[in-house]
Image (cartoon, rainbow, N blue to C red):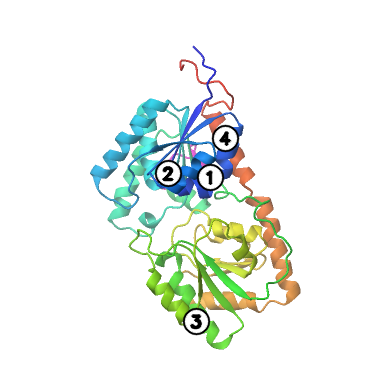
Amino acid sequence: MVSDRPLTLLLVANQGWNLVNYRTGLITALRRAGFRIVAAAPSEADSERRLRELGCEFRPIPLAPKSLSPFDSLRTVFALAAVARHEQPAAILTWTIKANLWGSLVGRLAGIPVIANVSGLGIAHSGKGWLRRVAEPLYRICLKAAATVFFQNESDFETMVTARLVRPQQARLLPGSGVDLEWFAANGRERPLERRFVMLARLLRSKGVEQFVEAARRIRARRGDLRFALLGFTDVANVEAITREQVDSWAAEGIVEYFEPVSDVRPILETAEAVVLPSYYREGLSRALLEGASMGRPIVTTDHPGCREAIEPGVTGFLCQPRDVDSLEQAILRVAGLAGAEWAAMSAAARERAMRLFSQDIVIERYLEALRDAGVATSNRSRSGQS
């Protein structure tokens, strides 16, 4: 029989904040399309509260993002399978590596369509070590039956298809997580008086934090009018994490300012002469760069997957080489050397490109299209056979 209950979508990520910070627009659109949303992630009070405020139901699952224990992975699979049996979702939507793997595996075993989002290949694909040798067959097995696998840049798309980890007919491109163009609006494109270069990121070595600080040290020795700021979480659960003690030491030295993570980064972006991300991590498509561009800020970033796609070199910002402090320093000084009219033109071009390529509306429409292609109608009636 056919029920009048709305179709359920099960959203899975390694942390609730991932869904809150990056998927709010998508969640809102899916609820407006008539879906009931159930979010599954490790329990964390603030994220749970905010997800419920978005209209989601929450199901806690054990998922340790950095654990390599097969027993932890089995616990995650069994917990997700139990949630799927109870909720009977019409589709499972996943983000982050372990959620993609184990959510896709559960969907494959249960016959539930899965839409996975590979938001960067991360450290597992940064070299040819044992972690990559383990990750690739897991991708191949778990993603085999996924209805759609989204990628956020062409390099990741081509890497995974060429290695036959996904099939070409499964793979689709997204413009990152998209950006809310109204929220991150260019409210006047005046050049900030502070001349501040801002880096927003999880403070990990592979994000280029140390290169940013060294470039700042060199530049401030000659240009005291230029300022540098870091905004992001310190002491995260990652072997590459920058400690708060180290950041405080840099701040005491007068090299950088440090801003605690905040829910609304717009006031910081408004003070930025440029947004900088010298990452050599395998990003998907940096959200911080898209937010900066949407607010009309020139971008300085690396010629690296997930970073280079955020700019048009020489038009909306400048590229530097990964792990190269000299190259980063030169790129920052190129922005600092722009005349007022040149900076304004780059600001306007950054905003226009964000509007044309990176709107979250594009992401939402592609998810709705993927659901339709998987046979999941955007209506308030569930699949035949469910009650």
Tag shown at residue 15: none
Q: Quadrant of residue 239?
A: bottom left
Label 3 vs label 2: CA separation?
A: 38 Å
Mark 4 lies on residue: 30
Is-magenta flag for residue 258? Answer: no
SS at badge 3: loop
User: Residue at (47%, 77%) from the top-left corner?
Assistant: 251
Q: Which mark sits nearer the N-terminus, 2 or 4? A: 2
* Of the two numbered discs 4 and 3 in the rendering, the one whose residue sits closer to the viewer: 3
Tag shown at residue 13: 2
Q: Where in the figure is residue 382, as x and y percent of width and height?
A: 52, 21
Q: Which range of residues does the magenta coloring cover? A: 162-172
User: What's the residue type where badge 2 is placed?
Assistant: Ala
Mark 3 lies on residue: 254
Label 4 vs label 1: CA separation?
A: 10 Å
**Left or right side of 81 for 302:** right
Q: Is 267 situated above or below 324?
A: above
Considering depth in this image, is 111 or 40 the residue closer to the camera? Answer: 40
